[in-house]
């Protein structure tokens, strides 16, 4: 592959160091420095030479590639072919590698940061896996790369391990890309926030115009490493660069260049929508239909798994509530058992023959109610738990006996203590 940036500047993948190391590009610059323009220039020339391009973009800029090339726009407000459904990275990766289908992902359609980073890392791993067999030329362009491979994964919305997995996928792409015919371009306005190893592994780095407030930090965090390798670079020189002007670092060489090669398509940042699109190849149309069907099935499966998970969680909550209720009953029975072990009941000896009998009202009670009334006559002021412990009853049996006594006004409750009353004759 050859990439022409200006009249005298051509990057040839058959020359060193790219023939040995592969093409690993980092492109850093502030807003308006020409990052997206230059990255899209690489993408256009890669497509023109028969390669396959994959772009992850947070803003609709690369959709203009459809003016000249057969690419698939996934999500976004302009020229959308399919919705961005981050449920099946292998489906997308398979179409890229096996069918040569170029894709542009509009990442703002995925609001969940963890889902987006996880999808991207899994997608890259799948591409590298499928490239073991096919070796198709693939160019991966990741805009806002500091959001995928940050220098400090902690303190973000997604867990650190999600970013660590993405950083590993990035490193694998840089280190193994040459063997698998995969080239990568990482684009960021904040190079100091991009993982240091990713910046270090790049063999072609572009630094564009930066604001004064970024210059000192950029010099300390990014350019210092280049100076330690013997390069003469000064961040203050980046303040005066114009759009399209770059400090280009290639191996042990550093030079200021200007990108003058015209784009084959318009700059997407200045073009709200397409006026025309390249004709869709029949094979591409079939691949899109197959991908849409596969994604629909993946969505259906994901929704089914989610509904099953919700049912399982509801059942778990139901069982937890039941368990809590049973634990309360067990605790109450333990209390009653402890009271029973410490409580002694005085049982009066049987009255001699001819002793006065109980009042007829008491005699007419059922056996349970009569036992409760007689116990309360002996020991006024017992709690329900104490009565249950004496007789070894459950709550329902005691409450049934107490209702009978309360209805006949043979017992009263004061501050949860039970007292026997004399029958009204």
Image (spheres, rainbow, N blue to C red):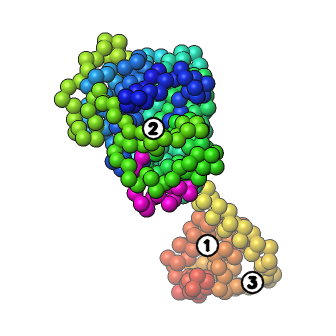
Other-residue count near label 1 (Cα within 10 Å), few / some / many at <14 / 14–19 / ≥20: many
The earlier-in-sequence mark between 3 and 1 is 3
Q: Is residue 210 on the magenta stretch?
A: yes
How far apart marks 3 and 1 lie (CA) works out to 25 Å
Residue sitting nearer the eye, 161 or 337 = 161
At which x and y percent is residue 2?
Answer: 45, 22
The earlier-in-sequence mark between 2 and 3 is 2
**Residue placed under numbered mark 3 in the picture:** 354
At mark 3, the secondary structure is loop
Q: Nearer the viewer, mark 2 or mark 1?
A: 2
* Count of all numbered marks drawn on residues in the image: 3
At mark 2, the secondary structure is strand
Left or right of residue 259, residue 390 in this image:
right
Give the vertical position of 120 relative to 213 (above or below). above
At mark 1, the secondary structure is helix
**Residue placed under numbered mark 2 in the picture:** 142
| Magenta part of the chain | 208-221
**Residue placed under numbered mark 1 in the picture:** 369
């Amino acid at each position: 592959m050859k990439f022409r940036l200006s009249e005298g500047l051509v990057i040839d993948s058959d020359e060193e160091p790219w023939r040995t190391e592969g093409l690993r590009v980092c492109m850093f610059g502030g807003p308006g420095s020409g990052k997206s323009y230059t990255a899209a220039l690489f993408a256009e020339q890669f497509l023109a030479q028969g390669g396959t391009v994959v772009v992850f973009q947070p803003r609709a800029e690369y959709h203009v590639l459809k003016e000249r090339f057969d690419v698939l726009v996934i999500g976004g407000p302009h020229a959308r072919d399919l919705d961005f459904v981050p449920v099946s990275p292998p489906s997308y990766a398979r179409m890229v590698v096996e069918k040569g289908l170029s894709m542009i992902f509009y990442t703002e359609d995925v609001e969940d940061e963890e889902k987006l980073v996880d999808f991207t890392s899994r997608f890259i791993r799948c591409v590298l896996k499928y490239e073991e067999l096919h070796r198709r030329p693939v160019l991966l362009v990741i805009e806002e790369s500091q959001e995928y491979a940050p220098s400090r994964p902690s303190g973000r919305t997604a867990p650190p391990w999600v970013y660590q997995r993405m950083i590993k996928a990035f490193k694998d792409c840089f280190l193994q890309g040459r063997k698998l015919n995969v080239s990568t371009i990482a684009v960021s306005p904040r190079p100091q926030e991009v993982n240091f190893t990713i910046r270090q592994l790049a063999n072609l780095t572009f630094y564009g115009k930066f604001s004064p407030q970024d210059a000192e930090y950029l010099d300390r965090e990014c350019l210092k490493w280049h100076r330690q390798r013997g390069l003469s670079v000064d961040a203050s020189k980046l303040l005066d660069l114009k759009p399209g002007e770059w400090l280009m670092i290639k191996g042990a060489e550093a030079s200021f260049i200007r990108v003058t090669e015209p784009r084959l398509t318009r700059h997407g940042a200045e073009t709200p929508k397409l006026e025309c699109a390249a004709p869709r190849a029949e094979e591409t149309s079939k691949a899109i239909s197959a991908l849409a069907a596969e994604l629909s099935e993946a969505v259906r499966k994901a929704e089914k798994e989610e509904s099953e998970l919700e049912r399982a969680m509801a059942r778990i909550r139901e069982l937890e509530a039941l368990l809590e209720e049973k634990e309360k009953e067990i605790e109450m029975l333990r209390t009653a058992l402890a009271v029973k072990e410490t409580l002694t009941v005085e049982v009066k000896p049987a009255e001699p023959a001819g002793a006065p009998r109980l009042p007829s009202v008491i005699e007419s009670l059922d056996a349970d109610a009569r036992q409760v009334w007689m116990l309360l006559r002996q020991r006024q002021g017992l709690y329900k738990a104490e009565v249950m412990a004496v007789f070894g009853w459950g709550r329902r049996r005691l409450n049934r006996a107490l209702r009978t006594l309360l209805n006949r006004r043979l017992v009263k409750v004061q501050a949860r203590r039970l007292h026997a009353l004399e029958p009204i004759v």
